[in-house]
């Protein structure tokens, strides 16, 4: 049919990855959604909701502007003498793609979910709040006080070059048992 289905069982629940053929052939995101919704309406299809499931990076990025990266053993300085943290943003490749998928899908025919292991910490709470705000489900997110959530410190130099310090946290612990 017009949909490609791949059945998968995650955490003991059956889910299926589902993508309209029109999403594969066209590139304009606004046209993708209009065409897919119009196609389903024209066919009068009542499809059960499919699940778009993302497994992977979900992280809090903290951005710090610096004058320059210091050499090993030397002192460095933040760009502004009175400001250390410039921004804190929730992201990660997987979470970004899920937010875009949610924006481009019909909520009557698809659910967008994150499968992740997160810590019971401020970063994890921030990620889950942002998932809620973006319409990304968290029913497959396992929260554990034994883990920490992923965080990245992004050091940005004036020329735009970035250096990243990352603690992959619970993301690195995802395995078949999760």
Image (cartoon, helix red, strand yellow):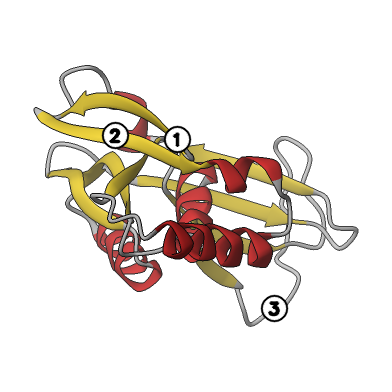
Looking at the image, is mark 3 or mark 2 earlier in the sequence?
A: 2
Tell me if 93 is positioned left or right of 57 in this view.
right
Spatial CA span between label 1 and label 2:
15 Å
Tell me residue 65's x, y (percent): 71, 65
- Tags 1 and 3 touching, CB below 8 Å: no
Looking at the image, is mark 1 or mark 2 earlier in the sequence?
A: 1
Q: Identify which residue is drawn at 83% across, 50% down.
A: 161
- Residue that numbered label 1 is attached to: 1
Tell me residue 21's x, y (percent): 56, 41
Instruction: Specify the quadrant of the image occupied by residue 64.
Output: bottom right
Most foreground residue, 62 or 79:
62
Q: Quadrant of the N terminus?
A: top left
Q: Identify which residue is drawn at 40% across, 39% down.
A: 18
Q: Secondary structure at mark 2?
A: strand
- Residue that numbered label 3 is attached to: 81
Asked whether the viewer can see residue 124, the reply is: yes
């Amino acid at each position: 049919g017009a949909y490609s289905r791949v059945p998968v069982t995650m955490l003991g629940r059956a889910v299926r990855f589902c993508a309209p053929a029109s999403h594969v052939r066209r590139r304009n995101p606004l046209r993708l959604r209009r065409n897919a919704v119009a196609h389903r309406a024209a066919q009068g299809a009542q499809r059960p909701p499919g699940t778009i499931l993302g497994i992977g990076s979900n992280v809090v990025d903290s951005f710090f502007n610096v004058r320059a990266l210091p050499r090993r053993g030397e002192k460095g300085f933040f760009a502004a003498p009175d400001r250390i943290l410039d921004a804190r943003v929730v992201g990660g490749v997987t979470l970004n793609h899920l937010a875009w998928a949610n924006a481009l899908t019909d909520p009557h025919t698809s659910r967008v979910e994150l499968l992740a292991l997160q810590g019971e910490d401020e970063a994890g709470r921030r990620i889950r709040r942002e998932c809620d705000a973006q319409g990304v489900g968290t029913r497959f997110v396992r929260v554990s006080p034994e883990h920490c959530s992923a965080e990245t410190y992004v050091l940005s130099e004036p020329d735009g070059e970035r250096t990243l310090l990352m603690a992959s946290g619970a993301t690195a612990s995802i395995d078949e048992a999760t």
